[in-house]
Amino acid sequence: MSKLTGGYSQRRPVLHGVSITVAPGEMVGLIGLNGAGKSTAIKHILGLMVPQDGEVRVAGVTLEENRDRFRSSTAYVPEQPSLFPNLTVKEHLQWTAMAYNIERNIAVARMDELARAFRMSEAMNALPDTLSKGMKQKVMLMNALLVSPPLLIIDEPFLGLDPLAIRGLLEALEEARAKGSAILLSSHILPALERRANRLVVLHRGRVIAEGSPREVKAQAGCADPDSTLDDAFEALVITAEGGQPLA
Ligand SMILES: Nc1ncnc2c1ncn2[C@@H]1O[C@H](COP(=O)(O)OP(=O)(O)OP(=O)(O)O)[C@@H](O)[C@H]1O
């Protein structure tokens, strides 16, 4: 998105001239306090909200220029899993494979790989109601990774996942990234982003207050100490943006 201003009312925009770029083969972490504007930015990128100013381009096109290309180039995993109650895990994946015209052999091999990566092999014939919260989230992630679209947007993927699932997810994302997917990850779990994201965008009150590699963001925050963490840097950036006031 480029110089985007937008929100829920014309009079009080939530985003003010926000630019976020995610290049193919790049994993970008979107971070910010509750209410900073992350979900609003994601809704604009998905074409669910109309910008007041600026534009969103996905795979080179705006929604108005090419609706099909814009929409089919993105897979989105929301924070709250939403699954079909009457479809098993495997049927969800088969349905996705069909909807996205993935060749049968490739889909079957990929489903096996994903089931192993997320330790879901034994749950493939289960219905959503019988799965734990984290397992439902895994099904959402497996569906998105099966499609492996040009742009993958994931909202707070780590909550509810056990440590091995987080590792499985990060490895699967790394693989998607290496194959050329652009990945935008919105999360409050900064250590995972610090280790894995190529770039970070820090949003505060609807504005980008820092951007760059984790190391660059720490430098922008004035965190010179090599032991300082991204959490330290984030706190320093927000305090500076608030004019030096301690956070309430
Ligand atoms: N449907 C809505 N109608 C009106 N205002 C909204 C709506 N959704 C969010 N907002 C407002 O927009 C601002 C940004 O909210 P947003 O959900 O984008 O934040 P966020 O960074 O995703 O926060 P969180 O980390 O809590 O998910 C907040 O001030 C919020 O109150």
Image (tube, rainbow, N blue to C red):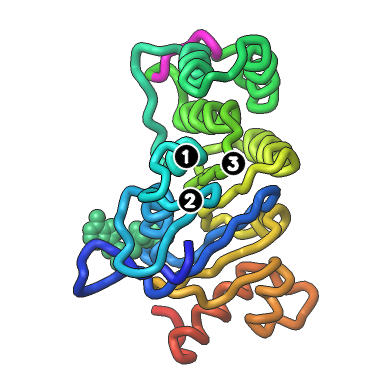
Task: Please name the residue that numbered disc 2 is placed on.
Answer: 61
Mark 2 or 3: the one toward you: 2
Q: Is mark 3 within 8 Å of ligand 1?
A: no
Give residue 71's position: percent from left, percent from top. 43, 40
Residue 108 falls within the magenta-colored stretch = no
Element under disc 2: loop
Q: Is residue 248 left or right of residue 145?
A: left
Q: Residue at x 57, y 61 (%)?
A: 21
Q: Residue at x 68, y 52 (%)?
A: 26
Return the mark for residue 213.
none
Task: Please name the residue that numbered disc 1 is placed on.
Answer: 69
How far apart, in angstroms, are the residues tagged by discs 3 and 1?
A: 11 Å
Q: Is residue 52 above or below residue 241?
A: above
Circle 2: residue type? Val
Circle 3: residue type? Pro
Q: Is residue 170 above or below residue 240?
A: above
Magenta stretch bounds: 124-128
Q: Nearer the viewer, residue 244 or 103?
A: 103
Q: Is residue 146 above or below residue 226?
A: above
The reply to whether the C-beta atoms of the residues labelled 1 and 2 are less than 8 Å apart is yes
Task: Please name the residue that numbered disc 3 is placed on.
Answer: 150
Residue 126 falls within the magenta-colored stretch = yes
**Which of pointers 2 and 3 lies earlier in the amino acid sequence?**
2
Q: Residue at x 46, y 26 (%)?
A: 132
**Which of pointers 3 and 1 lies earlier in the amino acid sequence?**
1
Q: Quadrant of residue 41?
A: bottom left
**Which of pointers 1 and 2 lies earlier in the amino acid sequence?**
2
Q: Quadrant of residue 216?
A: bottom right
Element under disc 3: loop
Circle 1: residue type? Arg
Of the four image quadrants, the one with ligand 1 is bottom left
